[in-house]
Image (cartoon, rainbow, N blue to C red):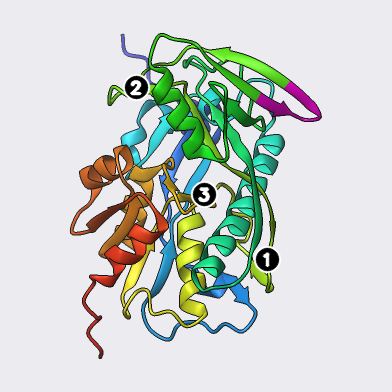
């Protein structure tokens, strides 16, 4: 005997199915999703004393959209082009709230702006007062040797008995220590000075690493007014883009009329450091219709090439090298 469902029961069942479907799409999980965002022109965000926005071309920076993933996105990240889903601890260390993480990112952005301005103005002959303090820890991989020892916000001032003036100094000390041997770090943590021993391991490329992302810590006084408004975007990865744009606005023809996308953390000595989210950033450059993308050399450049579709990837290790590579660009065709 067949029992037919009444229209009311069918309607209720349909509502339940729809409710479950909506919940899967909108309810957040504890994981985070990284999504591409279209590259943005830097010039409209920058006000520099005596400067002017370039008329043609321009430097572009790229950011990554980060938010909590829904259940569907966590299960099927391929539903969104260029998405990467990561555990919460890779974005927000245990014990750190989203608000605290956001505040850290904004502080990173503020320092990257100051460093970029210092590097650019020095290139133009200005007298800049800048004292490097050390390498600021921005992120600690929960699976790496530094986990449970270093914290976001720590400033490494010494490693292996040698002063650390910036991220490159910390990375150099870790390489010299080698994998499997402890390296002693001296860290400024708030008002305290802490000594921490960390045993590096070998990273994907065989290089000794402790599993941290770092940025420049410094005291800087600029000779002219520079204001950069990124509308709430955080992190240190736009430092190289800011420095190149400042040169453009102060009269140096850096891009030769081309639109150039740029990513890379910048140190006071001009060293360009690695950044995160390179997959999403490469896709964001493509979406903006830009075909030249300056990126940190090494793993960042290798990954960018995997996702580049018609984009020329230009790897750089320093601010000066970025200027030399840009000098080889042919002038953009004029309409």
Q: What stretch is highlighted in magenta?
A: 187-193
- Residue 267 is marked as 3
For the point 43% across and 56% down, the residue is: 62
| Pointer 3 with pointer 1, Cβ within 8 A | no
Q: Is residue 166 above or below residue 189?
A: below
Q: Judging from the image, what secondary structure is the residue with disc 3 in?
A: loop
Q: Judging from the image, what secondary structure is the residue with disc 1 in?
A: loop
Mark 2 or 1, nearer chain start: 2
Whether residue 148 is visible, yes or no, is: no
**Can you tell which quarter of the image residue 126 is in?**
bottom right
For the point 43% across and 86% down, the residue is: 55
Q: Is residue 81 above or below residue 205?
A: below
Between 199 and 55, the one lying in front of the other is 199
Mark 2 or 3, nearer chain start: 2
Q: Mark 1 points at which residue?
A: 222
Q: In this view, does 244 lie above or below 274?
A: below
**How many angstroms separate mark 3 from mark 1 (CA)?**
16 Å
**Can you tell which quarter of the image residue 39 is in?**
bottom left
Q: Specify the farthest residue to the left.
A: 310
Q: Where is residue 47 in the image (x, y as percent from the top left)?
A: 62, 75
Q: Judging from the image, what secondary structure is the residue with disc 2 in?
A: loop
């Amino acid at each position: 005997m067949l029992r037919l469902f009444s229209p009311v029961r069918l309607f209720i069942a349909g509502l339940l199915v729809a409710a479950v479907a909506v919940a899967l799409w909108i309810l957040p999980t504890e994981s985070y999703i990284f999504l591409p965002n279209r590259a943005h022109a830097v010039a409209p965000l920058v006000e520099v004393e005596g400067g002017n926005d370039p008329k043609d071309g321009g430097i572009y920076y790229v950011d990554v959209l980060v938010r909590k993933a829904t259940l569907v996105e966590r299960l099927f990240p391929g539903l969104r082009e260029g998405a990467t889903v990561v555990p919460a601890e890779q974005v927000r260390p245990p014990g750190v709230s989203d608000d605290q993480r956001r505040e850290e990112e904004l502080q990173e952005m503020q320092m990257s702006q100051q460093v970029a301005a210092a590097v650019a103005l020095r290139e133009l002959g200005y007298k800049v007062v800048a004292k490097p303090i050390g390498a600021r820890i921005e992120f600690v991989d929960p699976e790496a040797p530094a986990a449970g020892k270093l914290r976001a916000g720590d400033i490494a001032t010494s490693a292996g008995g040698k002063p650390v003036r910036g991220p490159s100094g910390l990375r150099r000390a870790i390489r010299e220590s080698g994998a499997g041997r402890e390296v002693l770090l001296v860290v400024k943590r708030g008002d305290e000075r802490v000594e921490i021993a960390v045993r590096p391991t070998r990273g994907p490329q065989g290089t000794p690493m402790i599993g941290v992302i770092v940025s420049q810590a410094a005291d800087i006084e600029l000779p002219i007014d520079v204001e950069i408004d990124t509308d709430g975007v955080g992190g240190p990865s736009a430092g190289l883009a800011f420095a190149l744009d400042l040169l453009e606005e102060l009269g140096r023809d850096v891009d030769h009329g081309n639109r150039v996308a740029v990513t890379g953390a910048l140190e006071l000595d001009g060293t360009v450091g690695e950044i995160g989210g390179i997959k999403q950033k490469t896709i964001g450059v493509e979406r903006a219709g830009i075909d030249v993308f300056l990126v940190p050399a090494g793993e960042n450049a290798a990954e960018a090439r995997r996702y580049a579709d018609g984009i020329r990837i230009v790897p750089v290790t320093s601010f000066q090298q970025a200027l030399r590579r840009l000098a080889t660009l042919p002038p953009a065709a004029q309409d």
